[in-house]
Structure formats: structure tokens, C-alpha cells
């Protein structure tokens, strides 16, 4: 069943009639139910969360939600309780989740004192996003909803209700209308008796009501059509954007996409749902609200003003025209800048609310260069807002052959970038990797050596790690290395590095070197680095971004008040993506998987982990570019300080080999949705060699892995500035389906994977959902691929595949998975080889430059089910590599010089005196 289904817009008599998993029966004289927890004081298992506080689950607003913190979810259990103020009688809990993919059970508990709790009912199977827990009438003052998780993933509880419904507890209703036992499908028909087309869409304007013919019919297994018009159906919708009455009247409340549907229960095991009938709500005046401040535009008859397309004029052309439509009274002023230098002032002009004025620019782009039209929008009594337009005056024919026209080598030997009209461009990826890129991985002095021996070596190696962890930190930031001498080490458990400055080094990744062998049949990681405790945001430090638009690739932006910030502050730049953004990118309009379901997206934020490098008044500059545009109409942006004292740094794993025991008798042929040749499919063994958790400035180098189930190296969501290099993985062992065989797996920010190799992976080089780049895969290859290298799902941003030989797909994955949708935005593939798919997501761009190999069409559009068009990415020089050979290396060289390239080249690891332990005195204080 589709997520986001709310009890919205239904007559209360029908709501009272619904029991869990049963069709509604009309009850004309039913009393209106009262939600006993509505706006009552609540407590939750989590601390207050800016993402979604507990009060949001009882506020009656179907658009807000409680989201437990990641730390709270570590024990796979979360809860919310409420004080009703006095003892009340009730028999029903209602719950509305975004999705129940990560929920394994829900329980209803009651208490007379808020301390001692009694479970009165639970549900552990057949959970759906909008569900009920029914039980016999009971009286209590305190109530609790307990949620057991199946995995540590974001869970959103939109609404929790406690009611006394008619009847005392669950049970069949004797008046339930019968339906044929062999009913195979149900569907709505129009006034003319014709079924609605699959995924038919009806467009309404905000505030409009329309009565639809929604007569219900069904089809039996033998093909016979059944009239179900006498069946007491309950019309439902999956969002708050519309209401639907039982006579078929649909009212459009706000911009967004919704479905109208009903369900028919055939038996206890079969619930049929009508095909999605989509309602698209539009509002031509939606961006005229005062909060949007203004709508600005740039036009020129010979220049593209499209996201992701270069905005280019010929030298000597007239300037583009700029207009400002004011949503509030404004004074508009500004300047014109060429190549960073101001060349003209835009005089102040007053623009009244609802008025549109052209900003006069009687100029010519008489010289080649990069131009910016910078606008200041001053509101009375409020901080100014800002907006900028971009274009480039250039003769494209002057670009040397074999180069990209949007990132080309200039006469000064540096890359010249050509942005689109809002400044979006190929971003600078050079800040990715150890210490922010361009820094040689250090060779750390061994302090303790461990020899191979018989039996499980987990405790012996862990003792050595703990011993070095107690040593003082040297001037270089390191305590020392634990040296694992050549030989085989049986590892039945997991090795943990929890302290900064500790390195785990072997004596070779080759046969005859150091081997960590994951013995036993327990799924786990061989090595885990860092804890699960990530950065802690200082919510009190928040200040709003005041630009109408900050382009992808930008490092500089304005804020409302920068007075509390200093150069060197560690900050989160939050890019908000509201519900309207989800509609804009079409991710609340994902067609169901044929024969299955899908989860539509909800609003989400992208938190970019940065360091302030410059402050000029209220203008902030950070150390690495933002990999997604920030736009006020989609929620804008915010700046926060944060503390990451729990994140360890200067740690590494190097120069060793990992292998895993597995049961060779476990064989399978399943491969995602198809079949392949028989392969080893045991999953009761080592999953990952190295798991990087809350860590920065770390590395894994010169390692090789065999027979792993999940990954050679996984960089978690709190992993930053990690380098993985000169490593290989072979012969992975698991079923070939979701979550497995992600050879090099990035979930964090500003990480670099270079000079690596993978065989038998599903996704050789892969980025998770909503990952805030930049991140880089450089000079790697995968073979015997069971799927593709890719951003995997749900809008990760700012990835670079640079000289990667692998099948790569950057596309709309639509209903794949549980609704993966647009997987990546603002990605670059540079001089890649193999098969490549690259499409353009709405509001962003992807760039395919210098690819040699087959251009593969996207998953969609197809020819018969989802024919809606998708745009190609920006493709250039298909079939021929471009100069420079490596985008990352050229960017790094320009930022830090030739030495930076030498620093990231291959260097032998350890050896000599570095591998002769020199003990240090332990220090309990460090």
C-alpha cells in the first residue's frame, strides 16, 4: 500500500466505520470521534529534534511529523507517550507513518501513573502506513505508542490518534457486504462506463472543487466484470493537498500531487486497491507570496536561460534584460561584475508590491569574460535579500579542440567554467579526500606489534589497539600504529578503533602478507572506525540564508546575521527542500511499480558540512562548494554551527588482506529481478571489511578483500575527508539483490576513492540517498558487474566519476526499490568508459563529458506505462575523451599546486624503521 495515506477529507461517519483491514460500512448516526491525544503533552524517546519534534505527531496537522533521532534508533526501538490529563476510555490507536519499510511492530500501552506500563495490543505483521490498533475498551490517563524497528532508518510519524470508536474492539461486522471470493481487481469507471486509464491525471486549480464519477467495478479471475456500486466503499486520498467526499467531490487545497483510491477486502489475506487516479493541483499565483519576496527573470533572444545549460553571448552582444516582480515593496539596486571586478552600478529603483519593473542595463558585453548581474532587494525594516544572474561572453569556436565548452583549459593553463544563467556549474571537487585533498597520507610509526597465532585473534588485536589508544598524541596528531605481522589472523568478532590518532597496519595485501580472516557464521564488520555519534548542531546559532538563489558550485552566500560567526567555525549549511520542491521534481508523482507499490517522497533537507573561510559583513564563504542550489521558493537555506567532538580523526587501515568464511553449499541464481548463473549466496558471514562511522581525515589504503557480502569499505553518513586508495575486492558472496555487494560505498561528504578495482559487485562505485557531496571516484575499474555504478536513490548530490571504467547510470529510477526516483543531481562523469546513462533531473543538471562507450537510454520513459518525458543530461564529446585527462586532478593542481598531485600519487606504505615498534608511555588523559 502506498505511503502517505492520511485520514483526510473523509466524513467522520465513515472514519468511525473503518476497522483495521476491513471495508467501511455506512453508519448514518455515528458520533464524531475525538482524538484524545490531540495537542496533549507528549514525551518521546528522542530529544527535541528540529527535523520533527514529538508534538508534531499530535498537532492535527497531517503535514508535520515526529522523526526520532538516529541515536535514539540505535536500540531499534522508539516510543511516544501522552498525558490525557485524566482517565479516558478508548479502544483504538490510529497511526500515520510516511512508510513502514523500517517498522517491524507497533504496540499500544497504557498506564495509570506514567511509570508502569501495560501492553494492551500490538501489531507485528501486515503493517501499512496508515493503520490502526484495535482492542477492548480500556480506561487510562497515560498512553504510549511503542515502535519496534527492523533497521536503523528515518521513521516519520505524521499523526497518532487515540479514540473510542463505535463497538468494543475488533471483530467482523455482520453487515459487511459480500464480494466475490475470486475477485482479482477493482477499478473506478467514468460516467460513460469506461474505466479510467492507468495513472490517469486530473488537473485542478487551488480552491477548485469537482465531482468525479467514481463508480466501482471489479474483475473476477475468469474475466467477468462485477458491479460493486452497492459496496460501501470509502474514498481515500494519500496526501493533505486535497479532500475527497464520498460522492466523489474533490477539493484542491494546495499545490501538490495526490491520488484518489478505495480498497476492497476480499478475504483476510487479500486487499484490493483501485489503480491510482492522480489529482494534480496547480496555482498560477503560488509564487506571489510575500515570503518569496520577488520573482526575477533574465531574457535574451540568443541566450539559453535554462537550468544546466550554458548561458553564452558573443562578445559585443547587448546585455540581457532583467525584470523584477515584487511580492513586497522593494528598492532594487546592484552592480555588474566582469571577471570578479565591478564595471557598472545599477541605480536604485523602487518597485511596489505586485509591480513588475525592468532593470535598465544599457550595456554591451564588449569584452570576453564571466559576467554577473548582482541585485540587492531591500525591504523596509528587514535585512536585504540578494539575487544574481550569470552569463559568459565568449567565442565558443576559440576553445581548442578536444575540450569541453563548459570546463575548458584557458590561456593561463587553468580551467574556465561556463555556468548557466543562475550560476550553476561543474563544481570544484578538489576538496575531497584526506585533509581536504592534496595531502599525502602519512606513514605512522608502529608502537605495538602483534604476531599471528592459533585461534581467535580478535581479543589480542583489540588489546593492542586499546593500548595504542591510551598513548599520548604526538605533534603530528598521531598516537601510533598497531602492526600486524605477516600471517593469518582468525577474527570471529569485530575490531574497533574508537580513538583519534590510531592506525592499523599489516605487512602486505598480497598472498603471504597479513590476512584478517573472518571466521564463523556471524554477519558483521571486521573493522569499525568511530562511533555512531555524529556532529551535534547548535540550533540556537541558526541564521537564514538571504539569497533568493544560491547556485550549485557556490562557496559564498549571504545570511541574515553573521555577527556570531568566525572564520574557522565548523558549520552546517542547510538546504531546505519543502513539499513544493518534491512536487517540482515529480517525486510525489511516482507511478506504482507494475503489480506492486511505491513510496512517494516527503520533504527533506541537505546538510552540507563545511568550514567558514571568509566573512565580509553578512557574506559567508566556506571551504567547499555547495553541491545543490538553495532556492527560497523551495524553503531557502539556513546556517548553523556544530560540534563534532565525538568524531575521531587521523585514523587508518592499511597494507592487509581480508577474507571471509562462507558456506559454499548455499547457492542461488536470483539476480535482482532476474536470474543468472548459479553463484555462492551465503549471507551468514563477514559483511564489510572496514566500516567508517563518525570519522574525518581518515584512510584505507593498500587493502584487498575476498568473499565479502556487502562492501570492502563503507563510508558512513558522518564520514568526512576519507581517502580509499590502491585497493581491490574480488569474489563477493551474498544473494545478488538490494543492499549487497556495494564494493566502494559512500554515504558521507568530501570523500575520495582512487586507484581501485572491483569484481562481482552489484554496484562497484555507489553513493547512497541524500548524500551531500562533493564525493569523488577517481581512476577505478569494475568487472563482472551484476548492476551499475551509480548514485543509488533519492537525490544524492555532487558526485564525480573521473576516469572510471564501469557501467554507470545516473537517472530517474522511478519505482525501483521502494521509489528510488531521481538518484543523483549535479553529478559529473568525466572521461569515463563503458555503458553510461545520464539524465537531467528537474531543478538541477548532470554532466556527461568525454565518455567513450555506449550511451544507454534511461529506465524511463518507456513506451507503454510511464511515457512522461525525461531530459538528457548535458552530454558533450561523446566518443572522445577530453582535456584535461582528470577533472579532479586539474582542479586540485589549480587550488594547491603541482605538489598536491605528487602527494596523492602512489607511495609505498610503512616498512623499515616505521615497522619497528617504538613504545610510548600511555596517557589516560588523551
Image (cartoon, rainbow, N blue to C red):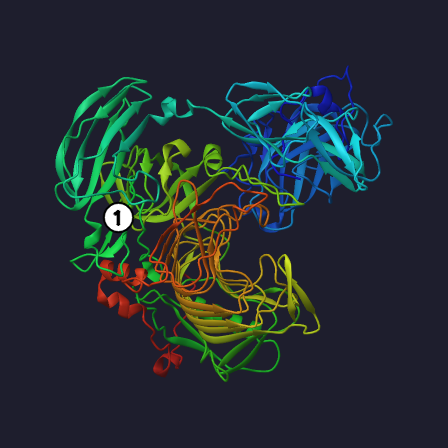
Q: How many numbered circles are shown?
A: 1
Q: Residue furthest right?
A: 174
- Residue 573 picture quarter: top left
Question: Would you say residue 651 is visible in this rendering?
Answer: no
Image point (24%, 60%), residue name: 401
Spot occupied by residue 887 in the image (x, y as percentages of width and height): 31, 60
Q: Is residue 773 above or below residue 262?
A: below
Residue placed under numbered mark 1 in the picture: 418
Q: Residues within 10 Å of mark 1 (few under 14, many from 20)?
A: many
803 left or right of 410 in image: right
From the viewer's side, name the closer residue of 888 and 98: 888
- Residue 249 picture quarter: top right
58 left or right of 381 in image: right
923 left or right of 275 in image: left
Spot occupied by residue 846 in the image (x, y as percentages of width and height): 39, 50
- Residue 317 picture quarter: top left
Spot occupied by residue 563 in the image (x, y as percentages of width and height): 27, 36
The quadrant the C terminus occupies is: bottom left
Numbered disc 1: secondary structure: loop
Spot occupied by residue 404 in the image (x, y as percentages of width and height): 28, 56
Q: Residue furthest top?
A: 29
Amino acid at each position: 500500500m502506498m505511503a502517505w495515506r492520511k485520514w483526510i477529507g473523509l466524513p467522520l461517519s465513515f472514519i468511525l466505520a473503518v476497522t483495521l483491514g476491513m471495508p467501511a460500512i455506512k453508519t448514518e448516526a455515528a458520533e464524531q470521534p475525538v482524538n484524545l491525544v490531540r495537542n496533549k503533552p507528549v514525551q518521546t524517546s528522542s530529544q527535541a529534534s528540529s527535523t520533527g519534534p514529538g508534538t508534531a505527531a499530535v498537532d492535527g496537522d497531517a503535514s508535520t511529523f515526529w522523526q526520532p533521532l538516529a541515536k535514539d534508533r540505535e536500540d531499534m526501538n522508539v516510543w511516544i507517550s501522552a498525558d490525557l490529563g485524566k482517565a479516558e476510555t478508548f479502544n483504538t490507536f490510529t497511526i500515520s507513518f510516511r512508510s513502514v519499510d523500517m517498522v517491524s511492530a507497533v504496540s499500544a500501552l497504557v498506564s495509570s501513573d506514567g511509570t508502569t506500563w501495560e501492553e494492551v495490543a500490538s501489531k507485528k505483521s501486515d503493517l501499512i502506513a496508515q493503520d490502526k490498533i484495535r482492542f477492548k475498551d480500556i480506561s487510562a490517563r497515560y498512553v504510549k505508542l511503542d515502535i519496534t524497528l527492523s533497521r536503523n532508518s528515518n521513521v516519520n510519524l505524521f499523526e497518532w490518534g487515540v479514540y473510542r470508536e463505535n463497538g468494543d474492539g475488533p471483530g467482523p461486522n455482520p453487515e459487511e457486504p459480500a464480494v466475490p471470493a475470486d475477485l482479482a481487481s477493482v477499478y473506478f469507471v467514468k460516467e460513460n462506463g469506461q474505466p479510467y486509464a492507468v495513472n490517469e491525471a486530473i488537473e485542478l486549480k487551488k480552491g477548485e472543487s469537482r465531482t468525479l464519477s467514481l463508480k466501482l467495478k471489479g474483475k473476477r479471475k475468469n474475466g467477468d466484470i462485477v458491479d460493486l456500486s452497492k459496496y460501501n466503499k470509502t474514498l481515500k486520498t494519500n496526501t493533505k493537498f486535497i479532500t475527497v467526499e464520498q460522492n466523489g467531490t474533490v477539493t484542491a487545497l494546495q499545490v501538490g500531487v495526490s491520488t484518489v483510491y478505495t480498497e476492497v477486502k476480499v478475504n483476510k489475506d487479500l486487499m484490493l486497491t483501485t489503480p491510482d487516479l492522480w489529482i494534480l493541483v496547480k496555482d498560477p499565483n503560488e509564487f506571489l507570496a510575500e515570503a518569496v519576496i520577488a520573482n526575477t527573470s533574465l531574457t535574451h533572444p540568443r541566450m539559453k536561460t535554462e537550468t544546466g545549460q550554458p548561458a553564452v553571448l558573443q562578445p559585443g552582444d547587448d546585455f540581457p534584460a532583467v525584470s523584477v516582480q515584487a511580492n513586497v515593496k522593494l528598492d532594487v539596486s546592484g552592480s555588474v561584475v566582469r571577471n570578479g571586478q565591478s564595471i557598472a552600478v545599477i541605480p536604485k529603483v523602487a518597485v511596489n508590491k505586485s509591480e513588475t519593473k525592468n532593470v535598465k542595463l544599457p550595456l554591451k558585453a564588449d569584452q570576453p569574460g564571466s559576467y554577473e548581474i548582482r541585485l540587492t532587494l531591500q525591504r523596509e525594516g528587514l535585512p536585504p535579500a540578494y539575487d544574481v544572474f550569470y552569463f559568459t561572453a565568449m567565442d565558443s569556436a576559440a576553445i581548442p579542440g578536444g575540450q569541453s565548452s563548459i570546463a575548458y583549459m584557458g590561456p593561463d593553463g587553468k580551467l574556465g567554467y561556463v555556468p548557466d544563467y543562475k550560476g550553476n556549474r561543474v563544481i570544484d571537487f578538489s576538496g575531497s579526500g584526506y585533509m581536504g585533498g592534496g595531502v599525502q597520507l602519512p606513514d605512522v610509526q608502529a608502537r605495538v606489534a602483534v604476531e599471528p597465532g592459533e585461534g581467535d585473534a580478535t581479543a589480542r588485536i583489540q588489546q593492542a589497539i586499546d593500548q595504542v589508544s591510551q598513548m599520548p598524541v604526538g605533534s603530528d596528531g598521531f598516537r601510533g600504529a598497531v602492526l600486524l605481522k605477516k600471517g593469518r589472523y582468525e577474527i570471529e568478532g569485530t575490531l574497533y578503533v574508537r580513538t583519534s590518532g590510531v592506525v592499523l597496519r599489516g605487512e602486505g595485501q598480497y598472498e603471504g602478507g597479513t590476512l584478517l580472516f573472518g571466521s564463523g557464521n556471524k554477519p558483521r564488520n571486521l573493522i569499525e572506525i568511530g562511533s555512531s555519534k555524529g556532529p551535534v548542531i547548535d540550533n540556537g546559532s541558526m541564521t537564514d540564508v538571504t539569497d533568493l538563489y544560491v547556485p550549485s558550485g557556490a562557496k559564498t552566500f549571504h545570511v541574515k546575521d553573521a555577527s556570531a560567526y568566525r572564520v574557522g567555525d565548523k558549520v552546517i549549511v542547510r538546504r531546505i527542500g519543502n513539499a513544493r520542491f518534491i512536487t517540482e521534481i515529480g517525486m510525489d508523482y511516482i507511478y506504482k511499480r507494475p503489480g506492486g507499490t511505491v513510496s512517494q517522497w516527503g520533504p527533506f533537507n541537505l546538510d552540507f558540512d563545511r568550514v567558514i573561510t571568509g566573512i565580509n559583513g553578512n557574506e559567508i564563504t566556506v571551504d567547499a562548494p555547495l553541491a545543490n542550489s538553495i532556492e527560497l521558493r523551495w524553503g531557502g537555506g539556513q546556517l548553523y554551527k556544530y560540534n563534532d567532538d565525538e568524531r575521531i580523526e587521523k585514523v587508518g587501515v592499511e597494507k592487509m588482506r581480508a577474507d571471509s568464511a562462507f558456506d559454499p553449499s548455499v547457492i542461488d541464481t536470483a539476480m535482482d529481478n532476474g536470474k543468472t548463473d548459479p553463484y555462492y549466496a551465503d549471507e551468514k558471514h563477514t559483511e564489510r571489511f572496514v566500516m567508517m562511522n563518525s570519522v574525518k581525515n581518515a584512510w584505507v589504503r593498500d587493502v584487498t578483500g575476498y568473499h565479502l557480502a556487502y562492501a570492502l569499505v563503507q563510508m558512513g553518513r558522518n564520514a568526512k575527508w576519507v581517502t580509499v586508495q590502491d585497493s581491490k575486492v574480488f569474489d563477493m558472496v551474498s544473494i545478488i539483490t538490494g543492499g549487497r555487494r556495494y564494493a566502494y560505498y559512500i554515504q558521507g561528504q568530501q570523500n575520495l576513492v582512487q586507484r581501485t578495482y572491483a569484481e562481482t559487485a552489484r554496484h562497484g562505485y555507489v553513493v547512497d540517498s541524500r548524500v551531500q557531496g562533493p564525493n569523488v571516484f577517481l581512476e577505478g575499474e569494475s568487472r563482472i558487474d551484476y548492476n551499475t555504478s551509480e548514485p543509488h536513490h533519492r537525490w544524492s548530490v555532487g558526485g564525480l566519476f573521473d576516469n572510471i571504467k564501469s557501467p554507470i547510470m545516473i537517472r530517474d529510477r522511478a519505482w525501483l526499490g521502494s521509489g528510488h526516483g531521481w538518484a543523483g543531481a549535479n553529478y559529473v562523469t568525466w572521461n569515463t568508459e563503458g555503458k553510461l546513462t545520464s539524465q537531467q533531473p528537474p531543478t538541477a543538471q548532470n554532466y556527461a563529458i568525454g565518455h567513450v562507450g555506449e550511451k544507454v537510454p534511461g529506465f524511463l520513459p518507456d513506451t507503454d506505462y510511464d511515457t512522461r518525458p525525461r531530459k538528457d543530461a548535458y552530454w558533450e564529446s561523446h566518443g572522445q575523451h577530453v582535456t584535461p585527462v582528470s577533472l579532479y586532478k586539474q582542479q586540485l593542481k589549480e587550488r594547491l599546486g603541482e605538489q598536491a598531485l605528487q602527494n596523492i600519487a602512489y607511495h609505498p606504505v610503512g616498512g623499515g624503521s616505521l615497522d619497528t615498534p617504538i613504545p610510548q608511555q600511555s596517557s589516560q588523559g588523551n
